[in-house]
Image (tube, rainbow, N blue to C red):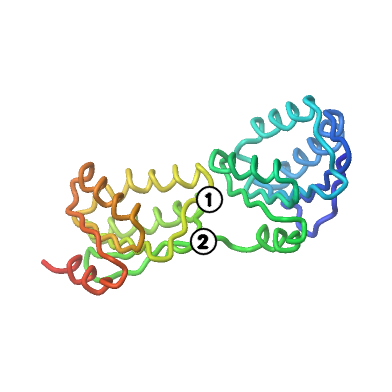
């Protein structure tokens, strides 16, 4: 059985799953609700709650879920799942990186936290002019595709104004990408703007960030250097010096 809960926002859908969920439940209740929400909004945020009364899906429901996800692949902005079922939480976490949107799993006792997560802003990228061609991108939290698109607009404007780019990437508080589409947006920024940089300083505190700088140095024409988190000031000096 699927029960749709009323929410205060037209772009947010809350679904309570209970008992045995069939294909007809999807087709009669959930699919029309998703379609209606997408006629009023470009994207929707979904909270799926699997309480104690939830038993199972039949194969028709699984297929209906798959069809709906594929047909509205770009229509989901964020998905929260509240469950105490180990197989649902493990499966959701395993599949999350392949979704085009952020996916977060909560226990049912954290349902209100899941609602807040759907409403709140996620990570952000702060752009700071450092003088001349130099600009800093500070990546905060887990980032969605829109954060990278906004950063790309800022970098493009900087390039047009200064005719060149020296880039400081501050990764000290960067926690990763929310979905594969966020990673794609990040790579697009690298391809269209970072590729034009003369010099890139990366400041971080994780091994993979150091490895990323090494990889970048081999594929980008820019001069690159990695700095440990405590050497932020040295990175700024290196970036801006002649």
- Marks 2 and 1 in Cβ contact (< 8 Å): yes
Residue 136 image offset from top left, x and y in percent? 32, 65
Q: Is residue 51 left or right of residue 178?
A: right
Please tell me whether residue 50 is drawn above or below residue 8 in the rendered image: above
Which of the image's four quarters has the N terminus?
A: top right
Which of the image's four quarters has the C terminus?
A: bottom left
| Residue drawn where x is 89% and y is 40% of the image | 19
Residue extending farthest to the front is 86
Q: Is residue 236 left or right of residue 68?
A: left
Residue 207, by quadrant, is bottom left
Residue 128, by quadrant, is bottom left
| Residue drawn where x is 67% and y is 34% of the image | 69
Between 18 and 77, the one nearer to me in the picture: 18
* Mark seen at residue 90: none
Q: Can residue 106 be seen by looking at this rendering?
A: yes
Please name the residue that numbered disc 1 is placed on. Answer: 178
Counting residues from the start of the chain, the first of labels 2 and 1 encountered is: 2
Find the distance from the CA under tag 2 to the CA under tag 1. Answer: 9 Å
- Residues packed near mark 1 inside 10 Å, few (<14), some (14 to 19) or many (20 plus): many
Please tell me whether residue 142 is drawn above or below residue 91 in the rendered image: below
Between 206 and 157, the one nearer to me in the picture: 206
Q: Can residue 42 be seen by looking at this rendering?
A: no
Kind of element beneath mark 2: loop
Between 157 and 11, the one nearer to me in the picture: 11
Between 136 and 23, the one nearer to me in the picture: 23
Kind of element beneath mark 1: loop
Q: Looking at the image, how many numbered discs can be counted on the residues?
A: 2
Please tell me whether residue 94 is drawn above or below residue 135 in the rendered image: above
| Residue drawn where x is 76% and y is 53% of the image | 10
- Residues packed near mark 2 inside 10 Å, few (<14), some (14 to 19) or many (20 plus): some
* Mark seen at residue 123: 2
Residue 67 image offset from top left, x and y in percent? 70, 28
């Amino acid at each position: 059985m699927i029960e749709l809960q009323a929410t205060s926002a037209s772009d947010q859908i809350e679904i309570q799953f209970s008992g045995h969920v069939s294909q007809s439940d999807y087709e009669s209740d959930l699919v029309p609700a998703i379609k209606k929400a997408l006629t009023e909004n470009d994207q929707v945020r979904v909270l799926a709650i699997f309480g104690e009364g939830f038993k199972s899906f039949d194969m028709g429901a699984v297929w209906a879920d798959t069809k709906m996800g594929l047909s509205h692949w770009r229509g989901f902005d964020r998905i929260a799942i509240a469950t105490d079922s180990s197989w649902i939480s493990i499966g959701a976490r395993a599949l999350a990186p392949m979704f085009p949107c952020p996916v977060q799993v909560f226990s049912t006792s954290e349902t209100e936290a899941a609602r807040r997560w759907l409403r709140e802003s996620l990570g952000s990228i702060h752009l700071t002019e450092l003088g001349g061609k130099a600009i800093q991108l500070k990546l905060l939290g887990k980032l969605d595709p829109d954060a990278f698109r906004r950063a790309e607009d800022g970098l493009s404007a900087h390039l047009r104004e200064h005719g060149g780019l020296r880039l400081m990437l501050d990764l000290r508080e960067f926690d990763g990408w929310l979905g594969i589409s966020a990673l794609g947006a990040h790579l697009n920024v690298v391809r269209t703007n970072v590729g034009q940089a003369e010099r890139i300083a990366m400041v971080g505190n994780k091994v993979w960030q150091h490895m990323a700088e090494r990889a970048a140095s081999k594929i980008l024409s820019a001069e690159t250097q990695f700095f440990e988190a405590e050497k932020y000031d040295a990175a700024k000096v290196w970036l801006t010096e002649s």
